[in-house]
Image: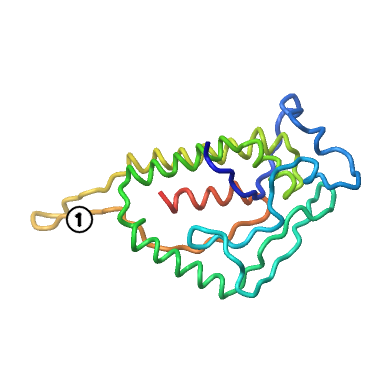
Amino acid sequence: SPPLLPPSPTSIMALPLGRARLATPLLRGRGAASVASRLDLGLPARYGLFIGGEFTEPANGGYFDNKSPVDGKTFIQAARGTKADVDRAVKAAHTAYWSSWSKASVADRSNLLLKIADIIEVNKDRLAHCETLDNGKALRESLAADLPLVIDHWRYFAGVIRAEEGTATEIDANTLSMCIQEPLGVVGQIIPWNFPLLMATWKLAPALA
């Protein structure tokens, strides 16, 4: 089966209460044990920075406690990135882009985006619980809105790029204007805290497509 994905926060949307009862008792109560430990999501004690295809230690070794709004307790430690880490990530992205990604065919890119969507779908319930722990939003919204939208966006852009076209316009008898879609290269993106997983998808899916 596909590997489990690391957690991340997501969005806030209103949904009918009739769809809201799945697993919500797990988030009730404020006992000595944290909600995260009772859910047994298999999270590591800390996450490093994902650079060059793997989790790495931050340059200055700094981490911060990520406290859940659900119970006010730390459920994981996250790496505190610095300029040195950003520079390292940009360098790794440029290497990946020029060595392979810029040469990948439309079919290969589309299939990879579809695979990302499939892995997220397999892990949808676990990710929804992680989102709620991280963000504090109602679990029903993570399950019924955020994760389905994340999955749909990856599949949408996987389909869009298969139908992408350029244009050719005759200006006069001696001039032909051609518009060809080409990637620009590495981009830096800032993901707000209130819709992180969904907003990350809005940015990552079209950038990778």
> Measured from the top left, where is residue 49 in percent x and y?
59, 62
Q: Amino acid at mark 1?
A: Ser
Q: Which residue is mark 1?
A: 177
> Measured from the top left, where is residue 168 in percent x and y?
20, 49
**Residue 152 versus residue 36: which sits nearer the camera?**
36
Q: Is residue 115 above or below residue 53?
A: above
56 vs 26, left or right, is left
> Measured from the top left, where is residue 123 in percent x and y?
60, 38
> Measured from the top left, where is residue 183 in percent x and y?
35, 57
Q: Residue at coordinates 56% horizontally, 35% vertically from top-left?
A: 121
3 vs 162, left or right, is right
Q: Quadrant of residue 19?
A: top right
Q: Quadrant of residue 14?
A: top right
Q: Is residue 149 above or below residue 67?
A: above
Q: Quadrant of residue 25?
A: top right
**Residue 143 versus residue 66: which sits nearer the camera?**
66
Q: Residue at coordinates 66% horizontally, 64% vertically from top-left?
A: 79
- Callout 1: SS: strand
